[in-house]
């Protein structure tokens, strides 16, 4: 939060730190300022704790949304049910988010197509909703998508869809070895070692073992890439788990 001292209305980062050190009241003041300045009041009002967590805590999976939901239920005696449940909003990830982001780019908004519905995507959705007469709430619901889908080149197009070789698993691999370009490099290295040991008396077993490892490595890489492609086609709306 210290990096946002100017946006939070302080004259310096030292002034922000002094407020935080003043006690519980000062820390609550910082929290309220952050919620107001970063536009998170709507998320709280509609009990959208996953979206609030994404905007307040970032993309890391820390489980704060579950803690907030349990606290709300303990205090009020009823479960927190958000009107945004099942829709795309902050905290959502995956294929539908990439599609949303790709369509927002076509609509002229500067959004990174990365499948992470963060504050930048929310702000772009709000701007799109404002420009197109849709309720401005930063939630990509049916009406927002209906307006955005007019930007598709054909009804069956899937903007933002990842090809098999475009997933993180295919590009980076597992530890740089299983998956991606590392598969071929590792396979060649092992096969070269197998060829050299094949002619050494008593090491024929090692040559055969290395050849088997090379084959398993390739098969493992293919399975890892396929899993990454399948995962990339899923969508997590970000609802609080039951």
Image: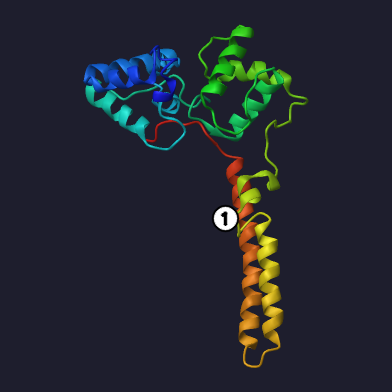
Furthest toward the right, the residue is 153
- Say which element carries label 1: loop
Q: Is residue 145 left or right of residue 236?
A: right
Image quadrant holding the C terminus, namely top left
Residue 84 lies, with reference to residue 160, above or below; the image says: above
Residue 28 percent location from the top left of the image: 28, 18
In which quarter of the view is residue 183 placed?
bottom right
Q: Is residue 46 left or right of residue 121?
A: left
| Residue at (68% x, 56% y) in the render | 181
Q: Is residue 45 visible?
A: no
State the scheme by which the image is colored: rainbow
| Residue at (66% x, 54% y) in the render | 180
| Residue at (37% x, 22% y) in the render | 81
Viewer-closest of 66 and 168: 168
In which quarter of the view is residue 74 placed?
top left
- What is the number of callouts on the image? 1
Image quadrant holding the N terminus, namely top left
In which quarter of the view is residue 21 placed?
top left
**Disc 1 residue crowd, few under 14, some 14–19, many 20+, Cα 10 Å:** some
Residue 34 percent location from the top left of the image: 39, 17
Residue 205 lies, with reference to residue 182, above or below; the image says: below
Q: Is residue 62 visible?
A: yes
Task: Identify residue for label 1.
Answer: 174
Residue 199 lies, with reference to residue 111, above or below; the image says: below
Viewer-closest of 148 and 22: 22
Q: Is residue 49 left or right of residue 26?
A: right
Residue 57 percent location from the top left of the image: 41, 29
| Residue at (48% x, 29% y) in the render | 91
């Amino acid at each position: 939060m210290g990096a946002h001292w100017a946006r939070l209305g302080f004259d310096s980062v030292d002034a922000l730190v002094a407020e935080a050190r003043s006690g519980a009241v000062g820390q609550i003041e910082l929290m309220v300022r952050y919620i107001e300045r970063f536009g998170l009041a709507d998320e709280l009002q509609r009990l959208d704790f996953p979206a609030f967590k994404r905007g307040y805590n970032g993309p890391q999976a820390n489980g704060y949304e579950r803690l907030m939901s349990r606290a709300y239920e303990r205090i009020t005696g009823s479960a927190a049910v958000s009107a945004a449940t099942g829709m795309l909003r902050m905290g959502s990830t995956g294929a539908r988010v990439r599609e949303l982001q790709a369509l927002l780019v076509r609509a002229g908004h500067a959004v990174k197509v990365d499948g992470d519905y963060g504050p930048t995507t929310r702000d772009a959705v709000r701007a799109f909703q404002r420009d197109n007469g849709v309720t401005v709430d930063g939630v990509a619901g049916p009406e927002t998508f209906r307006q955005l889908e007019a930007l598709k080149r054909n009804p069956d197009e899937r903007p933002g869809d990842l090809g098999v070789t475009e997933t993180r698993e295919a590009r980076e691999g597992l530890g740089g070895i299983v998956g991606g370009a590392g598969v071929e490099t590792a396979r060649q290295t092992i096969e070269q070692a197998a060829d050299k040991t094949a002619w050494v008396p008593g090491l024929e077993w090692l040559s055969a073992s290395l050849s088997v490892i090379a084959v398993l490595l390739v098969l493992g890489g293919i399975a890892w890439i396929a899993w990454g492609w399948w995962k990339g086609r899923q969508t997590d709306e970000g609802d609080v788990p039951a």
